[in-house]
Image (cartoon, rainbow, N blue to C red):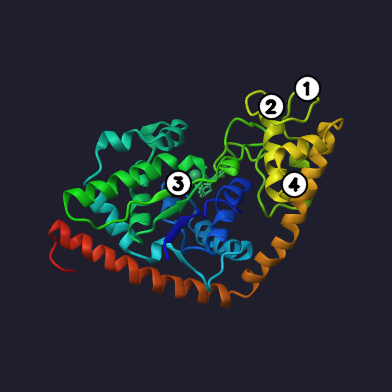
Amino acid sequence: RQRALSGIQPTSDSFHLGNYLGAVRQWVQLQDEFETFYFIPNMHGITTPHDPKALRERTVFAAAQLLALGVDPARSTMFVQSQIPEHAELTWVLSCITGFGEASRMTQFKDKSAKNGTDSSSVGLFTYPILMAADILLYRPQLVPVGEDQRQHLELTRNLAQRFNTRFKKTFVVPEAYIVSDTAKIYDLQNPTAKMSKSAESDAGLISILDDPKVIAKRVKSAVTDTEREIRFDRENKPGVSNLLTIESAFTGTSIPDLELAYEGKGYGDLKTRVADVLVDFATPLRGRVQGYLDDRSELDKVLTAGRERAREIASRTLADVYDRVGFLAP
Ligand code: ATP
Ligand code: MG
């Protein structure tokens, strides 16, 4: 079977709708067809100033959410990045075949460093895409499911894999990005031309999948729309309404044209009420399941221990090949 691999950062209290619709939902489906690897990139979580205690808690919390959302440990290898030392080791080798200019062109670094200026950004934030390339290439997956925001990083990963393979010897699989276009970008409810993000300035436009029903309802009801009245999908002119339609369609399976028909003659209030209901119905049972994994940690710990063993087995084999090919003495 072919392999798929992806990761989700433990950088906030709970995953948001974009993380779920753009990523984790696909992960769950891919388990049927692929040998799947899902990990928590906690080493990426220290590229900006952070609180160690929160990072540790969020790492566990992220694992609990993945299980509750349907990542199945019988079919997927789930692990924590920092427990596999090969990620850092391969990053060094890949750094040495990455051009400085090439790394400088990564738009996520430009965006993330714009706030405080590059002088106060860490080198780790700058080299983040190289660590991400190592995360992927170690496991030789064919497919990497991600949201639209990761397209450029995936392209870098592919370039580095090809470069290494040509410069030394075929070692890496050149992976394909798997981007589900309908939900590849969920937008901030308050600022519907910007992607919903854990690191947005304000979380007024963010829906966390574990939010309290009251918070969900409030955030959906105050979502920015437009001054027209018609409920119609138009990303250009009606980004807020289009975002809400995307969300409703993703959760209910009703196509957007069918939703447009059903909303004929209705107003934005009706749309918002319905979207809030759909989200609350999704979030309520999920909260219970996540809490279950946290209250009794034995299941979660077992999954992470097994994942770590399986991941190391594969990662250490790849790294041994890499070290051999670049001319290092055997470790
Ligand atoms: P940050 O904005 O700080 O990078 P994030 O919200 O993007 O955080 P990540 O852990 O970087 O969270 O992303 C996890 C996965 O969720 C990635 O595959 C990413 O592409 C996807 N994703 C993130 N935001 C969105 C979004 N708004 N819509 C669709 N997919 C998204
Ligand atoms: Mg991101």
- Cα–Cα gap, marks 2 and 1: 9 Å
Residue depicted at x 52% and y 51%: 11
The kind of residue on which mark 1 rests is Glu
Which mark lies nearer to you, 3 or 2? 2
Ligand 1 within 8 Å, label 2 CB: no
Relative image position of residue 123 (x, y in whole percent)? 33, 42
Identify the residue position indicated by label 3 in the image: 49
The image quadrant that residue 150 belongs to is top left
Relative image position of residue 63 (x, y in whole percent)? 55, 64
Q: Is residue 291 visible?
A: yes
Give the numbered dot on residue 118: none
Q: Is residue 124 visible?
A: no
Identify the residue position indicated by label 4 in the image: 216
Depth check: give the residue in front, 82 or 52.
82
The kind of residue on which mark 4 rests is Ile
Residue depicted at x 37% and y 51%: 175
320 lies left or right of 107: left
Identify the residue position indicated by label 1 in the image: 228
Identify the residue position indicated by label 2 in the image: 238
Crowding at label 1, few (<14), some or many (≥20) Cα neighbours within 10 Å? Answer: few
Crowding at label 4, few (<14), some or many (≥20) Cα neighbours within 10 Å? Answer: many
Which mark lies nearer to you, 1 or 4? 1
The kind of residue on which mark 2 rests is Lys
- Cα–Cα gap, marks 1 and 4: 24 Å
In this rendering, the answer to whether 164 lies above or below 259 is below
Crowding at label 3, few (<14), some or many (≥20) Cα neighbours within 10 Å? Answer: few
